Amino acid sequence: AQSVTQLGSHVSVSEGALVLLRCNYSSSVPPYLFWYVQYPNQGLQLLLKYTSAATLVKGINGFEAEFKKSETSFHLTKPSAHMSDAAEYFCAVTDLNTGNQFYFGTGTSLTVIP
Amino acid sequence: NAGVTQTPKFRVLKTGQSMTLLCAQDMNHEYMYWYRQDPGMGLRLIHYSVGEGTTAKGEVPDGYNVSRLKKQNFLLGLESAAPSQTSVYFCASRLLAEETQYFGPGTRLLVL
C-alpha cells in the first residue's frame, strides 16, 4: 500500500526566509509524486510533479522539490518566502500499479510572517 | 473552458436526508474522482471512475454512491446523511495519459 507522511502540520517562516516542507512516501514500486497548494476556500492546484524524469523538479511560483529514493523523500523548498505563499500544501503519491488512485498527506499549513 | 465545476457550493442537511453533488468537467477527461477533506486528515478518496459507465470504490466509500452516465459528469449521492459526513467534498479529473489531477472549487456540506 502507498502512503505519504508530511512532517509538521504547521510551519511558520519569515518573509524572505527559506521555505522547507517535508514529505516522505512509502511505495513498493517507482512512485509518481506531487505537491499541490490550496488557498483558502479554493480547490487544489498543482505546484509540481515528479514522474521518473529529472530528480530535481521545478514548479510554479519559484517552488522546487527533489526526489531522493534513498531517503524516500520529496521535500518542497523555496529560497525566499513571499506573503502570497501562505496556504495549505499537500503532498500526494501514485504509482504505475495503482495509477487510478492517489494518496494524499495530511497537509502542511504555511504561515509567512511579515 | 470552465474546467471542473461543482454544484452546489454549500449545503446544510438534516440527518437522514439525501442529496446529490454534481461534478462537471469540460476537458474531455477520462478519469474523475470524489474526495472528502477533513481537518488533519488531508484528502481521502471516496469513489472514482475510469470512464463513462464505470465506477470503483476508494478509501472511504461507505455511505456514498456514485454514477457516471455521461463522460463529463460524475455524481456523488448521500442516501441517508449522517453528521460524520460533514466535510468539504472535492471533485477532480484527469486525462488517461496524464498524471495531473484538476480540482473543482469544492462543496461544503454540513449535516445537522
Image: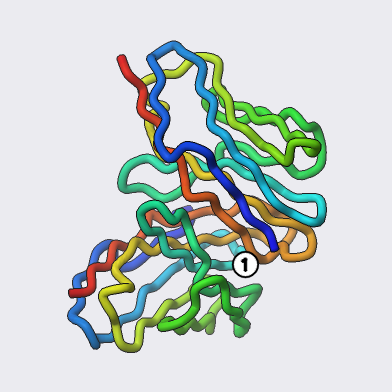
Residue B76: percent from left, percent from top: 42, 77
Looking at the image, how many numbered discs can be counted on the residues? 1
As displayed, is residue A52 above or below residue B9? above
Judge left or right: residue A23 versus residue A68: left
Rendered image quadrant of residue A35: top right
**Pick the front one: A73 or B17:** A73
Disc 1: which residue: B31
Residue shown at the point (23%, 73%) measured from the top left? B111
Residue shown at the point (81%, 50%) measured from the top left? A30
Chain hosting mark 1: B
Residue B85: percent from left, percent from top: 33, 73
Circle 1 — which element? strand
As displayed, is residue B50 above or below residue A77? below
Residue A36: percent from left, percent from top: 53, 43
Q: Amino acid at mark 1?
A: Tyr
Q: How is the image coloured?
A: rainbow
Rendered image quadrant of residue B108: bottom left
As displayed, is residue B20 above or below residue B104? below
**Pick the front one: B64 or B102:** B64
